[in-house]
Image: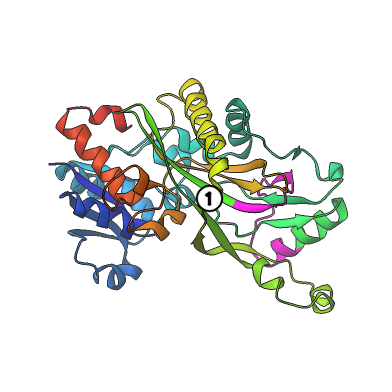
């Protein structure tokens, strides 16, 4: 019987609880410093203790995963802790398309795929001297918002970049990505595409709470102006959001366009969970500034199922459980190669 494995971070509790609910063995690759935390949860069958997550590519770890016929579920920590080359070298079958994770990690490749999917994206700024309106500067990969900063012009960019370098938050040789800031209501649209059924499912929506940019809104403007600290966009947590029903048709269209674009650009395509991230403006028009090509932590708020999944399933269905259901169905029909890379 196939088992489900993942790294001990991000959304591992949801993933492994869902796998156990589906009757699958669960394995956690766990850093030693968090062993005490994860031993609290009885649905985790086995811990592989490591000093660093990168050890998942070592022969010792790979051997245990192979003996258990494990499928590795990727999430944001895998991308944050490992290079694309390291992820692609993992011998354990990875749920979804491990090749598309490279496109998520590289800002230029990410923008190319979003344009291929006809997603409305903010204008990129190729050089700091070309900053003409409020823009946001982002790091490569899954940084969780840490080290992002907003700028109004080139001088503003240089001042804040140098400050973050001096504070050790970003490195001097780090390649940064600039795009015009899109204002509106944040909405992170969560999907699941099943290559077994060839169907797209809309799972839910979340909003992310970022510190300390969010906390600044509670400070009077006079004190804000006296504050010289570059505010952080570090994600602290998530909360649920329900969209107006009239927006759902466009949501499904965006998801389907992204799936079709991924099939063309990076085979076998966008299989499994993914997220299109952006804002709705005053005309309820969506602008997408990111995508995540795997399960996102915002799905953790729906561990007992989301409102939208209650329309599709007559049972509680988390994203972790949905992944496990897909793995189990693929195994029973000898199609594991269709959902893993």
Foreground residue, 70 or 25?
25
Q: Quadrant of the C terminus?
A: top left
Residue 63, horizontal then vertical, whole percent: 20, 45
Single out the residue that lies furthest toward the front: 246
- Locate residue 252, reporting x and y percent: 50, 35
Instruction: Specify the quadrant that holds the N terminus.
Output: top left
Q: Is residue 172 left or right of residue 243?
A: right
Residue furthest top as drawn: 264
How many neighbours does mark 1 have within 10 angstroms: few (below 14), some (14-19), or many (20 or more)? some
Drawn side of residue 123 relative to residue 187, left or right:
right
Which quadrant would residue 105 be assigned to in this image?
top right
The foreground one among 145 and 288 is 288
- Look at the picture and state if 330 lies above or below 64: above
Q: Is residue 170 magenta?
A: yes
Whether residue 72 appears in this view of the structure is no
Examine the image and state in which quarter residue 270 appears.
Answer: top left
Residue located 52% across and 40% down the image: 248
Residue closest to the eye, 212 or 57: 212
For the residue pair 146 and 304, the one nearer the viewer reads as: 304
Up the image or down, 35 lies above or below 7; here it is below
Q: Is residue 189 above or below residue 330?
A: below
Residue 128, x across and y down, in percent: 81, 45
On the image, numbered disc 1 is attached to which residue?
142
For the record, the magenta segment spans 163-186
Tell me which corner region of the image, top left, top right, bottom left or bottom right, holds residue 16.
bottom left
**59 magenta-colored:** no
In the rendered picture of this protein, how many numbered marks are placed on residues? 1
């Amino acid at each position: 019987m196939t088992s489900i494995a993942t790294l001990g971070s991000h959304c591992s509790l949801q993933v492994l609880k869902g796998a156990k609910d589906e009757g699958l063995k669960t394995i956690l690759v766990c850093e030693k410093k968090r062993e005490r935390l994860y031993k609290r949860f009885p649905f985790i069958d086995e811990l592989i203790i490591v000093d660093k997550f990168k050890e998942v590519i070592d022969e010792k770890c790979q051997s245990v995963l192979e003996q258990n016929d494990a499928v590795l579920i990727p999430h944001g920590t895998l991308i944050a802790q490992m290079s694309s080359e390291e992820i692609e070298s993992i011998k354990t079958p990875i749920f979804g398309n491990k090749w598309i994770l490279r496109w998520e990690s590289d800002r230029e490749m990410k923008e190319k795929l979003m344009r291929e999917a006809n997603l409305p994206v903010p204008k990129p700024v190729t050089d700091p001297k070309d900053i003409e309106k409020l823009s946001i500067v982002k790091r490569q990969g899954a940084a969780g918002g840490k080290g992002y900063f907003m700028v109004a012009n080139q001088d503003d960019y240089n001042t804040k970049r140098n400050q973050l370098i001096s504070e050790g938050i970003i490195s001097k040789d780090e390649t940064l990505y600039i795009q015009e800031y899109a204002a509106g209501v944040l909405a992170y649209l969560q999907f699941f595409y099943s290559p077994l059924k060839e169907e797209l499912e809309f799972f839910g929506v979340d909003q992310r709470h970022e510190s300390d940019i969010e906390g600044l809104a509670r400070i009077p403007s006079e004190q804000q102006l006296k504050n010289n600290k570059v505010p952080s966009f570090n994600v602290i947590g998530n909360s649920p959001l329900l969209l107006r029903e009239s927006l759902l048709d466009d949501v499904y269209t965006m998801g389907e366009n992204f799936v079709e674009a991924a099939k063309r650009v990076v085979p076998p395509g966008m299989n499994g969970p993914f997220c299109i991230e952006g804002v709705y403006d005053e005309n309820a028009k969506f602008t997408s500034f990111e995508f995540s090509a795997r399960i996102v932590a915002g799905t953790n708020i729906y561990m007992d199922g989301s409102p939208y999944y209650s329309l599709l399933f007559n049972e509680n269905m988390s994203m972790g459980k949905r992944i496990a259901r897909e793995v189990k169905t693929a195994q029973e029909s000898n199609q594991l190669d269709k959902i893993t890379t």
